[in-house]
Image (tube, helix red, strand yellow):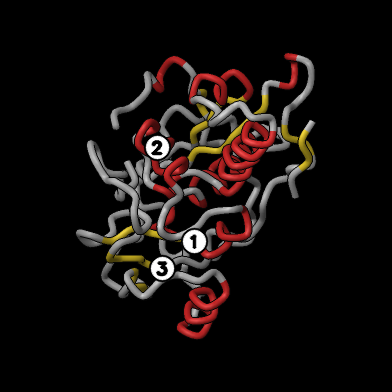
């Protein structure tokens, strides 16, 4: 085991609905984000809203309901720490802008993802997976990036090239949270002989800091961009 600290690919065949009571290791249990306003009509009618705990957690999973606590100083430090090139501009969202619907040419980024291997510009392997999923980069939680990139490193070390999407979904499924701005998180199929990636607990308190990146965020210098572009709006 490894220990880690285009069009849509028939998602209905492998993606499972979120269970608010799910306790899987790769789940997302962020309870620390500060919400703004009411539920915004983002409550799923299929969930029993008599369960107040379930109802509260569903509201949390709309990025547009989470107050942004990131500062200009933190954004500047992030650029320096992770070497974000000058060809990529960055700014904090304005009060009248929705995080789930970035302006044209922009994409929403959470700084906490950089600790999980995420980089700007996008790594070609990450770009390929995002196109396959048909999701925005921040529409999935940090553990998904850890799982993807850990598999990528293991395959490379074994001389196997890049792990395919089919190989990934043989090990994991993505669960989706309810609401119109849905996140996905990863869950290992532990009944197939043990999880491939271990020691990967849920990441906490990452939703309350975010910014917009614009410019050449999608492709690295020398990469050839062709075909469908990565989705930028949550859906």
Quick one: label 2 or label 1, which is nearer the N terminus?
Answer: 1
Residue beneath the point at 59% across and 34% down: 186
The reply to whether callout 3 and callout 2 are in contact (CB within 8 Å) is: no
| 132 sits left or right of 159 in the view | left
Q: Work out which residue is located at the far left of the displayed protein and give it.
A: 104
Residue 123, position in %: x, y?
A: 45, 49
* Pair 3/2: label in front: 2
| 135 sits left or right of 83 in the view | left
* Pair 2/1: label in front: 2
Residue 115, position in %: x, y?
A: 63, 59
Depth check: give the residue in front, 60 or 134.
134
What mark, if any, has residue 110 been given in the picture?
Answer: 1
What mark, if any, has residue 233 been given in the picture?
Answer: none
Depth check: give the residue in front, 152 or 213.
152
| 200 sits left or right of 103 in the view | right
The correct choice, above or below, for 180 with respect to 214 in the image is above
On the image, numbered disc 2 is attached to which residue? 128
Q: Residues within 10 Å of mark 2 (few under 14, many from 20)?
A: some
What mark, if any, has residue 211 been given in the picture?
Answer: 3
The quarter of the rendered structure image containing the C terminus is top left
Quick one: label 3 or label 2, which is nearer the N terminus?
Answer: 2
Q: Residues within 10 Å of mark 3 (few under 14, many from 20)?
A: many
C-alpha distance separating marks 3 and 2: 23 Å
The correct choice, above or below, for 90 with respect to 234 in the image is below
The quarter of the rendered structure image containing the N terminus is top right
The correct choice, above or below, for 7 with respect to 200 in the image is above
The reply to whether callout 2 and callout 1 are in contact (CB within 8 Å) is: no
């Amino acid at each position: 085991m490894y220990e880690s600290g285009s069009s849509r690919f028939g998602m209905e065949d492998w993606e499972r609905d979120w269970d608010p009571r799910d306790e899987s290791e790769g789940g997302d249990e962020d309870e620390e984000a500060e919400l703004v306003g009411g539920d915004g009509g983002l409550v799923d009618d299929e969930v029993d809203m008599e369960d107040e705990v379930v109802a509260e957690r569903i509201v949390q999973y709309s990025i547009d309901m989470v107050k942004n606590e990131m500062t200009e100083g933190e954004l500047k430090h992030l650029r320096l720490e992770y070497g974000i090139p000058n060809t990529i501009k960055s700014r904090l969202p304005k009060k009248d802008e929705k995080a789930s619907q970035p302006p044209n040419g922009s994409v929403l980024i959470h700084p906490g993802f950089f600790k999980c291997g995420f980089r700007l510009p996008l790594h070609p392997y990450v770009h390929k997976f995002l196109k396959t999923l048909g999701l925005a980069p921040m529409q999935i939680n940090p553990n998904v990036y850890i799982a993807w990139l850990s598999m990528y490193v293991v395959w490379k070390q074994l001389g196997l090239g890049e792990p395919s999407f089919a190989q990934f979904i043989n090990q994991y499924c993505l669960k989706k949270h309810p609401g119109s701005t849905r996140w996905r998180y990863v869950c290992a199929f532990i009944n197939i002989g043990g999880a491939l990636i271990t020691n990967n607990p849920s990441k906490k308190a990452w939703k309350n800091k975010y910014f917009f990146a614009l410019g050449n965020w999608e492709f690295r210098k020398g990469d050839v961009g062709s075909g469908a572009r990565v989705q930028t709006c949550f859906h």
